[in-house]
Amino acid sequence: MIVFTEGNLEITINHEVNARKFDDPIHGLSHCMKAVDFVIELDDCYQFIEIKDPQNPGAPTGTDTQYAQTLLSGGITEDLRYKYRDSFLYEWASGRAEKPVDYLVLVALDLLSEPELSIANDMLERNLPLHGPGSTPWERPIVRNCGVFNIASWNRSFPDYPVRRLP
């Protein structure tokens, strides 16, 4: 079992995998490349995990509502896109991008509804791009799947990677 913390969120990886915190000083290129928070290697794919926590108890009042509005207007999508793209390039250049990659974004914001998460997911899919140029699919996709989740939908979708807020 592996336990990661990001702010006051804790994610527990309940099976044997190769998992590492990616957005840390060891990354070495934070001056020029953005990084996802965690990279998990499974037998058949990599999972890039990015965690956003506007509901953190240390955040100023009203930050959660502002963040939700910015997310739903596409204002966060560019940052998420660059985090994914730079992380993918870093892993590719390091010889570790030979499997499909899934990009999982946890937005720890309880007020996001399922339809709002779906809207955020659709925007992210278009901006990565998930399907390649126009109607021509990539020969080798740069991302296989992506998803935007709140804590409740994350825990339903990934019971082997439960997330909880620390006291």
Image: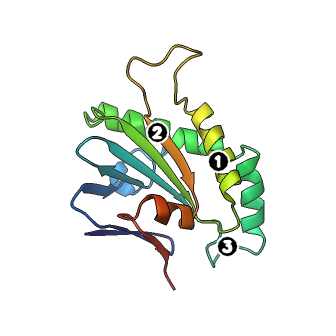
Name of the residue lying farthest toward the top:
136
Q: Residue at x 52, y 13 (%)?
A: 136
Can you give x and y, in whole percent of width and height, for residue 37 in the image? 44, 55
Give the CA separation, mark 1 to mark 2.
13 Å
Can you give x and y, in whole percent of width and height, for residue 54 in the image? 65, 66
Q: Quadrant of residue 5?
A: bottom left
In the structure shown, which secondary structural element does the residue marked by tag 2 occupy?
strand
Q: Amino acid at mark 3?
A: Ala
Instruction: Report which residue position mark 1 lands on.
Output: 118
Q: Residue at x 43, y 29 (%)?
A: 142
Front tag of 3 and 2: 2
Instruction: Report which residue position mark 2 lands on.
Output: 145
Give the CA separation, mark 3 to mark 2.
30 Å
Q: Nearer the viewer, residue 149 or 22?
A: 149
Asked whether disc 3 touches disc 2, contact meaning CB atoms under 8 Å apart, the reply is no
Instruction: Report which residue position mark 3 lands on.
Output: 59
